[in-house]
Amino acid sequence: MITLSDIKKARETLRNTGIKQTPVLTSQLISERYQNRILFKGEHLQKTGAFKVRGAAVKVGQEVAKGADHVIAASSGNHGQAVAYHAQRLGVRSTIIAPVDAAACKKDAIETYKGNIELCGTTSEERITRAKQLAEESDGSFIPPYDDPAIMSGQGTVGLEICEQVDQLDAVYVPVGGGGLISGTATAIKEQFPHVRVIGVEPSLANDTYLSYHNGRRTSIQKAPTIADGLRASIPGELTFPVLQKYVDDIVLVSEEEIKEAFTQIFTYMKQVIEPSSAAAAAGAFKHRNQNENVVVVVSGGNVDPAVIPDLLVQ
Ligand SMILES: *Cc1c(COP(=O)(O)O)cnc(C)c1O
C-alpha cells in the first residue's frame, strides 16, 4: 500500500511541471443552506482542468526516466489529456485510445498537446486491450488511469494540500471512479489526521465501489449509465480497493437529479463551471451531512462538454 511518505515524494516530482496548488473556494450561501462551513478544493482550475495531471506527472515521469519514448493511455477524458500534456512537456510521443463516439471537445484537448488519437470501439475493455497491445508492439509504456502506486501517490497530493490549506477539518468528500483519487487523498489525510472523516461519493447508477465496500470484496456492475462520465468505472481497482477498506469512513450514493442540483447551485452561487463527476461529490456533501462542521468537497475537474450544460441546469 502507498504511504504518506510516497505522497510527499510525489509532490517533489510535481515541481516545475505546470501543476499548481489549486485554491480552496467557499460560498457563504451554500454553507448557510447546509448548516456547515463547506469549502471546495478547486481542481477544476488545475492545469488541463482536472486532478489527473498529478498522478500522470509521477507515472509518465517515471516511465520516461526509464527510457520510454512513447506513452499510451486508454481514455478520451481527463486521464488522456493529462498523459498527452506530460508527454509533450517531456518530449515523448503519446497515443490516446479513445472511443469511436468521443466528444469533439475532448479530442481537441488531446490534440492541443499533440497526442495521437486512435479510435477504438465503445467499451473501456476494448480500449484497454488495444492500448496494452499497442504498448507491446511499439515498445511503449501503458499508463493506467488509477490502479498504480505512482498514480495513487500523485493523486494523493490533493489530500496533502487540503491538510495544509484548511484548518479544523472535520470531513472530506471525494468522488469515486476507479479509486485513485480517494485512495491517495485518504492516505494523505488519515496518516496525519486520523479523526478527519473521508467519505467517498458515487452516483447510484455507478455504485460498484459502494457495493464492494459493503460486501467487503470487489464487486462489479454491468453498466454505469451516469451523467458523471469520470465515475463510470465498473469495478474498483485491485490496488485502490484495500486502501479504501483501510481508510475510507463511508461510501454514499447520489442520484442523477441531485448531481444536477449541485451543479446548478455551484454555477449560480459560485460562478464556477465544474464537471458532473465533481458535482456528484458536492451532492454527497449536501445530502449526507452532520451540522456545524468544516467540510471539504474535492472538485475534481471542470471539463464539461458545453453541449451538456443545459441539461445540468435545473429549476
Ligand atoms: C477520473 C476522475 C474522477 C475519479 O477518479 P478515480 O481516481 O478514477 O476514482 C473524478 N472526477 C474527475 C473529474 C475525474 O476525471
Image (spheres, helix red, strand yellow):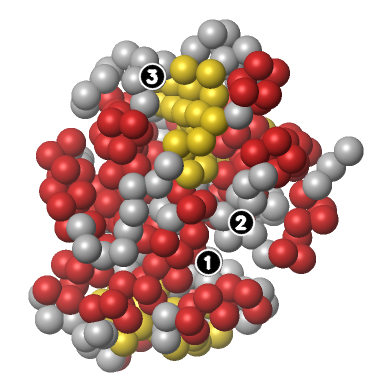
Task: Please report whichever mark, 1 or 3, sits nearer to the chain's N-terminal start.
Answer: 1
Can you tell me whether the CB of the residue at mark 1 lies under 8 Å from the nearest atom of ligand 1? yes
From the viewer's perspective, is residue 99 above or below residue 119?
above
Tag count: 3
Mark 1 burial class by Cα count in 10 Å: few <14, some 14-19, many 20+:
many
Q: Are marks 1 and 2 in contact (CB under 8 Å)?
A: yes
Q: Position of residue 291 (x, y in %)?
A: 57, 8
Q: Can the viewer see residue 209?
A: no
Residue 77's disc is 1
From the viewer's perspective, is residue 289 above or below residue 259?
above
From the viewer's perspective, is residue 104 above or below residue 277?
below
**Which one is in front, 232 or 271?**
271
Q: Quadrant of the C terminus?
A: top right
| Element type where label 1 sits in the image | loop
Furthest residue to the bottom?
A: 138
**Kind of residue indicated by mark 2:** Asp
Residue at (69% x, 52% y) in the render: 227
- Place residue 264 in its image quadrant: top right
**Kind of residue indicated by mark 1:** Gly
Q: Nearer the viewer, mark 1 or mark 3?
A: 3
Q: Which residue is mark 3?
A: 169
| Element type where label 2 sits in the image | helix
